[in-house]
Image: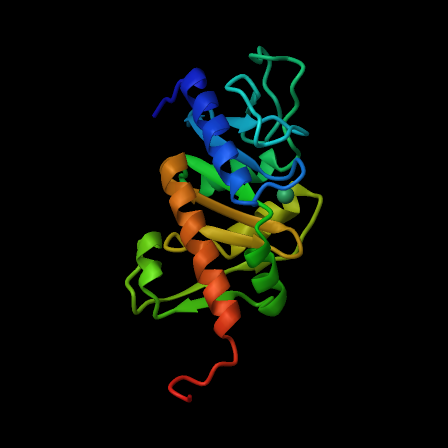
Amino acid sequence: MSVGLEQAGAALAAESARMAGLGWMRGTSGNLSVTLQREPLRLAVTASGLDKGELTGEDVVVVDSAGAAVPDQPDPGQRPSAEAGLHARIAAVAGAGAVVHVHMLSAVVAGQRWPGGVVLRDLEMLKGLGRRDDDVMTVPVVPNSQDMGVLGDAFEAGFDAATPAVIVARHGLYVWGRDLVQARHRTECLDWLFQFTLATNGFQEGVA
Ligand SMILES: [Zn+2]
């Protein structure tokens, strides 16, 4: 697999603007990545510290399997977020073509409510994550850390190929897919599922 940097940069800018519009990338938070090649692993990641609603196709950094910028960047003035290290780990372990990291409120609140994992069940919207409507899907919650190695180990320990997401407690959400569009669709569905599950928690079914 090989994706061109120019194409990846344009897609990253467009999807970042879309997700910023959904309120998922407030301030300069969050970052998106596209896997450019596998051997050796190279990812195009949105540059750090920028307004995600206003990126251009050049606001991108190429990183290696540790999330470190490689030489010969399109713009040597740009830096990757430290979080690029977890993007690279997810791309390697899950075989993802794209990773979305957003500070989505519904995910963080759900992770706070259910720190042992957020259980999503019996909802049509689960089909948007490749599951059946009567499935039970548990989204893992890992403790926050500034050390991407620690976070990566926690992600890998709970990794299930059928659950393309992990919540980082009191921080945000990572979601992945074969490309950015699929990863965004999954993120949209997860937001709905988290919001529904939080809003209906404590309801007694069938009681008026
Ligand atoms: Zn973050």
Residue 185, position as x, y percentages in the image: 38, 45
Residue at 45% x, 18% y is 5
In the image, is 207 to the left or to the right of 144? left
Residue 135, position as x, y percentages in the image: 33, 67
Does 154 sit above or below residue 25? Answer: below
Q: Is residue 112 visible?
A: yes
Residue at 34% x, 25% y is 1
Looking at this view, name the residue that lies furthest to the front. Answer: 208
In the image, is 184 to the left or to the right of 111? left
Residue at 41% x, 20% y is 7
The quarter of the picture where residue 11 lies is top left
In this rendered view, identify the residue nearer to me: 178 or 17: 17
In this rendered view, identify the residue nearer to me: 110 or 148: 110
The quarter of the picture where residue 25 lies is top right
Q: Quadrant of ligand 1?
A: top right
The quadrant of the picture occupied by the C terminus is: bottom left
Residue 80, position as x, y percentages in the image: 63, 27
Residue 53, position as x, y percentages in the image: 57, 31
Residue at 63% x, 30% y is 51
Q: Is residue 42 visible?
A: no
| Count of numbered marks | 0
Colour pattern = rainbow
Looking at this view, name the residue that lies furthest to the bottom. Answer: 207
Does 178 sit above or below residue 7? Answer: below
The quarter of the picture where residue 148 lies is top right
Does 56 sit above or below residue 180? Answer: above
